[in-house]
Image (cartoon, rainbow, N blue to C red):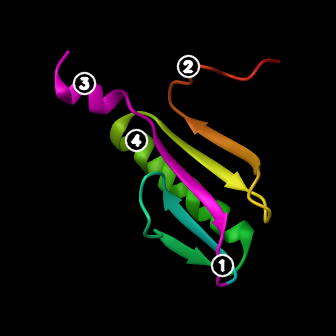
Amino acid sequence: MSARRAVNRRRRVFNVEPSPRGGWVIRERGCTRALARCAYKRLAVIRGRAYAHGAHLACGRAQLVVHRRDGRIQFEYTYGDDRFPPRG
């Protein structure tokens, strides 16, 4: 398998997390720098979905993970193939 194929199989994961400075940030997994900062969670989720959908169109698979204020996962959106879809 070529290196290009291996890269295309990876899923790009974006996180909506609370910011220590207040508000919410959108980060890509593995990166420390925030892609965007929003004052409200609703706006961060909308913007995060746009990032994830764009990544899905570019590389095939993407995911947005939305966290609660305490850091736990609240819900997630998956774009493209999902190898482990939820039951039900």
Q: Which mark is residue 57?
A: 4
Q: For marks 1 and 3, give the one nearer the viewer.
A: 1
User: Image height check: is 81 above or below 39?
Assistant: above
Mark 4 vs mark 1: which is more N-terminal? Answer: 1
Alpha carbon of mark 3 to alpha carbon of mark 2: how far?
Answer: 17 Å
Provide the residue span drawn in magenta.
1-21
Of mark 4 and mark 2, the one earlier in the sequence is: 4
Q: Quadrant of the N terminus?
A: top left
Which label was assigned to residue 20? 1
User: What amino acid is at disc 4?
Assistant: Leu
Q: Position of residue 75 (x, y in %)?
A: 75, 45
Residue sitting at x 41%, y 59% = 31
Residue that label 3 marks: 5
Point 51% across, 61% down: residue:
27
Q: Nearer the viewer, residue 71 or 62?
A: 71
Quarter of the figure that contains the C terminus: top right
**Amino acid type for the residue under numbered disc 3:** Arg
